[in-house]
Image: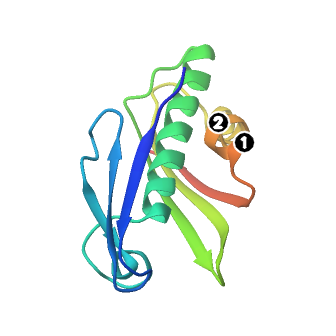
């Protein structure tokens, strides 16, 4: 399986603009720029997309792990914060809220750790990954 995305950039790094398109067209010429990346400009940025990828991959992996243990979540919500500092991505922090009937806190915590270590995006990132998890 292969997936792809395309970035197009016009102009200088600071004054120029670009857009991103994904294979599925979920992103379709979605704008990004210096201001959307390093300030509060309108548009997306690579770090936001990395956060979405990590949150999505982790949440699906956690669900599979819980399913394998006999539990079906009512809902898992994961927020991911990517930290960009001094030109490097220094951390990916996962904040997880789970509603999982019948699961104990210990089982949930073990599943979270397993998913954090073994989701494909966690394996891809070469950064410090932290988490907070709440079982509702």
Answer with the quarter of the image where residue 136 lies: top left
Query: What residue is at 44 percent from the left and 80 percent from the top?
Result: 13
Query: What residue is at 57 percent from the left and 14 percent from the top?
Result: 70
Disc 2 versus disc 1: distance between alpha carbons? 6 Å
Answer with the quarter of the image where residue 17 lies: bottom left
Q: On the image, numbered disc 2 is attached to which residue? A: 119
Percent across and percent down for residue 73 are: 44, 28
Of 44 and 53, nearer the camera is 44
Disc 2, disc 1: CB below 8 Å?
yes
Query: What residue is at 53 percent from the left and 38 percent from the top?
Result: 57
What colouring style does the render use?
rainbow
- Label 1, residues with CA under 10 Å away: few <14, some 14-19, many ≥20: few
Of 10 and 70, nearer the camera is 10
Of 65 and 109, nearer the camera is 65
- Which mark, by number, is residue 123? 1
Query: What residue is at 61 percent from the left and 36 percent from the top?
Result: 108
In the image: residue 33, left or right of residue 125: left
């Amino acid at each position: 399986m292969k997936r792809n995305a395309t970035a197009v950039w016009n102009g200088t790094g600071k004054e120029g603009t670009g857009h991103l398109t994904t294979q599925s067209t979920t992103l379709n010429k979605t704008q990004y720029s210096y201001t959307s990346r390093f300030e509060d400009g309108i548009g997306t940025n690579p770090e936001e997309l990395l956060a979405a990828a990590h949150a999505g991959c982790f949440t699906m992996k956690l669900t599979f792990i819980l399913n394998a243990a006999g539990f079906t979540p009512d809902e898992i919500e994961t927020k991911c914060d990517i930290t960009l500092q001094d030109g490097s991505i220094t951390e990916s922090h996962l904040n997880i809220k789970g509603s999982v009937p019948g699961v104990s806190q210990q089982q949930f915590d073990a599943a979270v750790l397993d998913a954090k270590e073994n989701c494909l995006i966690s394996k891809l990132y070469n950064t410090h990954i932290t988490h907070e998890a709440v079982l509702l």
